[in-house]
Amino acid sequence: MYDLIMHGRSMKVQRILLALGGNAIKRAKDRGTADEMLANLHTTCDQLAGLVAHGHQLCLTHGNGPQVGQIYLRNQLAAREVPPWSLNLCVAESEGLLGYLFQQQLTNSLLAAGLRDHVVASLVTQIQVDRNDSAFGNPNKPIGHFYTEADAKEKMAREPGCAMKQDSGRGWRVVVPSPKPIRIVEGRAVRALCSQPNTIVVASGGGGIPVIVDESAEGKGMLKGCDAVIDKDHAAVLLATEAQSNLLMLVTDVDYCYADFGKPAQRELRRLRVGEARRLLDEGHFAEGSMRPKVEACVTFVEATGHPAVITSLDKVTESLRDRDSIGTWFEK
C-alpha cells in the first residue's frame, strides 16, 4: 500500500471488499422500475469510480432483496401461464441481471472519469451452505417490497407456507431461509480475476446462489440448488478472503450503526473493538435481517484477518476512508 494526500490528510490505498446494500440499487420509495435502477446505479457507480480514481482496488458485492422478491412474485403471479421457477433460480436471475447492470454502469462511470484501462467483470457465484442449517426451519431473511400489517396477514392466510415479518419498523416483508455461507464454489476464479491489474470484480451478488453438496453414495459430491437467500454481508466475508482484501466496507443507508436504535437513548457508534461489538450483539442492539448481519460480518472479518471493517453510507465512503474519526462505524481488534 502507499499513501495519497487528500485535502491535507493521508489516505491509504487499499484492496477493498465493498458490499453495497439494496439502497444502492433501489431507494425506499422506488417502485423498482428499470429506469429507477439505472438512475440509482449511475449515482452509485460514480461514487465507486471516485474510489478507483484515488487508487483503491475494488471487489464488489451487492444485495438483491428487492429484486429477487420482485422476480419471485412475478413467477407466482404468472404461474397459470408460465411454469414458476424455484427461489434459487430467482436468485440466479437477480445475480446475472444486477451483475450486467453493474458492469455497464460502472464501466460508463470509469470512462467518464478518464479511467479507460479498467475492466469490470461480474461472476455468477454459487455459495455452499449446510443442508442441516437451522435457518431452513426459521426463515428470517426479508425479500421483496413492504406490506402493511393487514395486507401481510391477508397474504399469509391466502398463501399457505408464506412467512412474513415486520422489518425494522418499515413494514412487513416476505421472509425466507438464510443459511450461513460455507464456501464460494468459484473461489479460484474470484482469486484469478482479482489478481489481474485494473480489474474490478463483482461476485456473490445477493449473497450468491445457495447450493448444497449431495454427500450420498449416489450423489458423489454433486451440487444442488436449494431455496434460500444468503445474507450478502456474511457472504462478503468469504469473498473478502478470496479477494485478499485488507478492508471490508459495508455500505448501507446510514452513516453509522447505532446502539438502542429507534429508542430515546439511541447513540451512534464510532469505533468498536470486536469484544464490545460482541457484547452489543448479545444484548440485542442490532435488528435481525438488517444491521445485525452487518455487525456479525465485521466482527468475523476482523477476528479472522486482523484487518479493519467499516459500516457507513454510500455518499460518505470517501470521507470515511480519509478520516476514520469523522464518519462510519469502524471495527478493530
Image: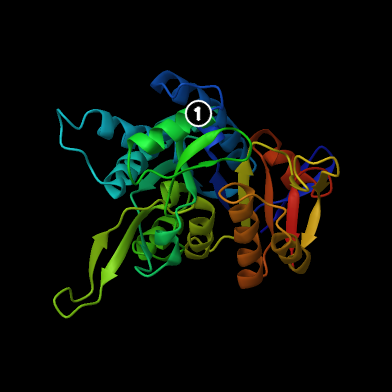
Q: Amino acid at mark 1?
A: Ala
Where is residue 315? Give x, y as percent: 67, 33
Camera-side residue: 60 or 49? 60
- Tell me how many marks there are: 1
Q: Residue furthest front?
A: 157
Where is residue 71? Give x, y as percent: 33, 34
Instruction: Locate residue 47 relative to residue 161 in the image: left or right.
Output: right
Q: Residue at x 54, y 53 (%)?
A: 233
Residue 235 visible here: yes
Instruction: State whether residue 263 is above or below residue 179.
Output: above
Q: Quadrant of the C terminus?
A: bottom right
Camera-side residue: 206 or 145? 145
The colour mode here is rainbow
Q: Quadrant of residue 37?
A: top left
Instruction: State whether residue 57 is above or below residue 130.
Output: above
Mark 1 Cα-neighbour bin, 10 Å: few <14, some 14–19, many ≥20? few
Q: Quadrant of the N terminus?
A: bottom right
Q: Quadrant of residue 247?
A: bottom right
Where is residue 243? Give x, y as percent: 49, 60
Q: Residue at x 56, y 33 (%)?
A: 171
Q: Residue furthest bottom?
A: 217
Q: Residue furthest top?
A: 35
Which residue is disc 1 drawn over?
150
Label 1 element class: helix
Camera-side residue: 93 or 8? 93
Q: Residue at x 62, y 50 (%)?
A: 249
Camera-side residue: 292 or 121? 292
Residue 145 visible here: no
Q: Quadrant of residue 29?
A: top right
Where is residue 263? Give x, y as percent: 79, 41
Instruction: State whether residue 127 is above or below residue 256.
Output: below
Instruction: Locate residue 25 relative to residue 33 in the image: left or right.
Output: right
